[in-house]
Image (cartoon, helix red, strand yellow):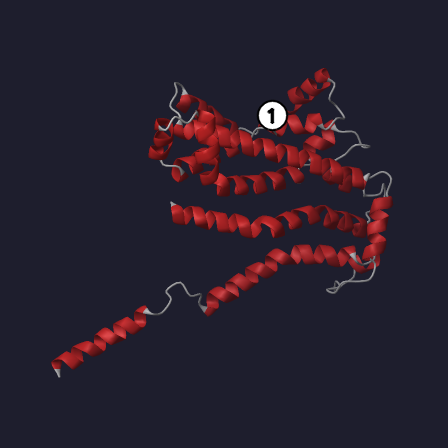
Amino acid sequence: MTALTQARPAQAVKGRDKRDPFRATPLTKVALGFTLILSIFPIYWMVIIASRTNSDAVDVPPPLLPGGNLGENVQRVLATEDAHFLTGLLNSLIVTSTVTLSVVIISTFAGFAFARLHFRGRNLLLGSILLTMMVPLQQMGIVPLYQLMVDLGWVGSLKAVILPYLLNGFGVFMMTQYTDQAVPEELVEAARVDGASTLRIWWNVILPAVRPGMAVLALQTFMLNWNEFMWPLIVLTPENPTVQVSISFLTAAHTTDYVLIFTGTALSVLPLIVVFVAFGRQIVGGLMEGAVKA
């Protein structure tokens, strides 16, 4: 009898252990659903207005279903001569892709150097990079930077938009921390013992380990530079803009064409959505894989 009595609580505890402690509660599901609605609604509303007329855009209550004017509104955006919208899209793709590639490669090199190479002044250099993150260099240095572009003869050229963003202090700091956590120092020392050069270690040891961090940095850099507005507006000509500057030119002189602005914005968001859909799962999966390996 005593053994049977003791077995029952043990079986009960064993049964409770089978429950998933990380299973979402109904309240958690409701909160996540509400957050998802809040996140998606601005994009949905942008598409709604882009498919309507200006009279629908100011209706009370506002329309919540798409209209039938999306194709016509897209044609109006592309036909607006002052906006140069297709040129802006192409320029933004060129600038953003170049800057993203440069930031990821340079940050990965610098992260490897700061995390796993020993040289004099390493901490001082890393501290200097951190200081650049604390100071709003774009706002404080915009006048001398513009004067530099004038002296170089780059005003109106995409080089003036690309050059200031080829290096990112946050990217260097992020990849330094990621490399320090993802790559054991013993692994680098073992590669050195095997006769691998520094470049070979970076290519064969560092890159495979920090690939998830590179993907996250690339996605963030792409988004930030795609949405950049102030510097391209200052340094580029109206005939050779980026996409965000093109959207600002969609506004008429005396009236605001909300449908035209929302349609242009919807078109400018499409590349970001494509990047998220194409690489979002890989980025999250890579991060989880890196966490499991760590």
Residue in front for this viewpoint, 289 or 35: 289
Residue 224: x and y, percent?
61, 39
Residue 165: x and y, percent?
61, 29
Residue in front for this viewpoint, 191 or 283: 191
Going by the picture, which residue comes out furthest to the bottom?
A: 1
Instruction: Quarter of the image for the C terminus: give it.
Output: top left
- Reply above or below: 172 against 52: above
Q: Secondary structure at mark 1?
A: helix
Residue annotated with mark 1? 140
Q: Determine which quarter of the picture holds residue 59.
A: bottom right
Tell me the residue at 74%/48% (across/down): 267
Q: Is residue 249 visible?
A: no
Left or right relative to 141: residue 250 = right
Left or right relative to 166: residue 1 = left
Q: Determine which quarter of the picture holds residue 236.
A: top right
Going by the picture, which residue comes out furthest to the top?
A: 151
**Residue type pointed to by label 1:** Met
Tell me the residue at 41%/39% (across/down): 182
Q: Determine which quarter of the picture holds residue 198.
A: top left
Left or right relative to 248: residue 113 = left
Instruction: Quarter of the image for the N terminus: give it.
Output: bottom left
Q: Is residue 151 visible?
A: yes
Label total for image: 1
